[in-house]
Image (tube, helix red, strand yellow):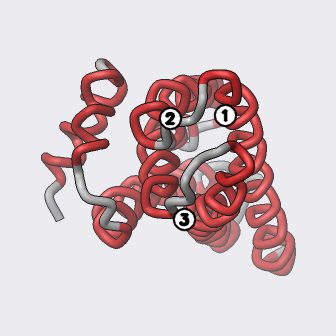
Amino acid sequence: MDYKKIWERIKAIISSPNTEWDKIAAEPNDQNEMLINYVVPLVALGAITTFIGKASLSEYTVYQGFMLAITYFISMVAGIYISAVIVSELEPGFNIKQDFGGTLKLIVYSATAVFVASIIANLHPGLSFIGLFGLYGLYLFWVGQPKIMKVDEDKRVGFVLISALIILAITFIINFILQSIFVSSAT
């Protein structure tokens, strides 16, 4: 795993998204590469900071902090993958050629802002305002969408909004279910 490559991608997608999306569009849609070598390390770091942030508070036990970290990890990875499946199924309705690999690529790299914001915000409740930086992911999706998916201009807003709602809903539902199973049973 090339951590320097991950760091360079994070800096580039956040600071100059137009240029970076051009590079991303030219890369192959290697789903395993994106998930294993980009999503998993970033989400794992977010899970670690979740554990540190929750376990350091007196209202959570170490075990509950650990279970919250596990639910964070599973819900983020599964949420991204399942969202890509659902969004790619909706693409023909927007006159887009169905392309799961391209959809996954768009969702993964757009979520970079969410990953970075979560890593920092999960450390302590006082840092939760940093989570708002995750909204930058919506802008990243907006900028990357025409380069990856080629949606007609008149359908672009609808595609972005529906995709964003699907991603949020899926991730929230998975996280809610896992927390009710793992964290509630830990009390």
Residue count near mark 1 (Cα–Cα under 10 Å), binned few <14, some 14–19, many ≥20:
some
Question: Above or below — where is 149 with respect to 143?
Answer: below
Residue at left 59%, top 47%? 96
Mark 2–mark 3 CB contact (< 8 Å): no
Q: Name the residue type under label 3.
A: Val
Name the secondary structure under disc 2.
Answer: helix
Please state the horizontal and vertical placement of residue 171, each as a whole percent of the image.
71, 57
Q: Earlier in the sequence, mark 3 or mark 1?
A: 3
Residue annotated with mark 2: 145
Distance, label 1 to label 2, CA atoms, is: 8 Å
User: What's the mark number on residue 77?
Assistant: 3
Mark 1–mark 2 CB contact (< 8 Å): yes
68 or 107, nearer to the observer = 107
Distance, label 3 to label 1, CA atoms, is: 20 Å
Q: Earlier in the sequence, mark 1 or mark 2?
A: 2
Question: Can residue 139 be seen in this snapshot?
Answer: yes
Please state the horizontal and vertical placement of residue 145, each as a whole percent of the image.
50, 35
Residue at left 60%, top 69%? 78
Q: Name the residue type under label 2.
A: Gln
Residue annotated with mark 1: 160
Relative horizontal placement of residue 158, taking residue 54 as reference (left or right): right
Q: Which quadrant of the view contains residue 22?
A: top left
Question: Above or below — where is 165 with respect to 67?
Answer: above
Residue count near mark 3 (Cα–Cα under 10 Å), binned few <14, some 14–19, many ≥20:
some
Q: Name the residue type under label 1.
A: Val
Relative horizontal placement of residue 183, taking residue 88 as reference (left or right): right
User: What's the mark number on residue 136?
Assistant: none
Residue at left 39%, top 65%? 35
Name the secondary structure under disc 3.
Answer: helix
Which quadrant would the N terminus be assigned to in this image? bottom left
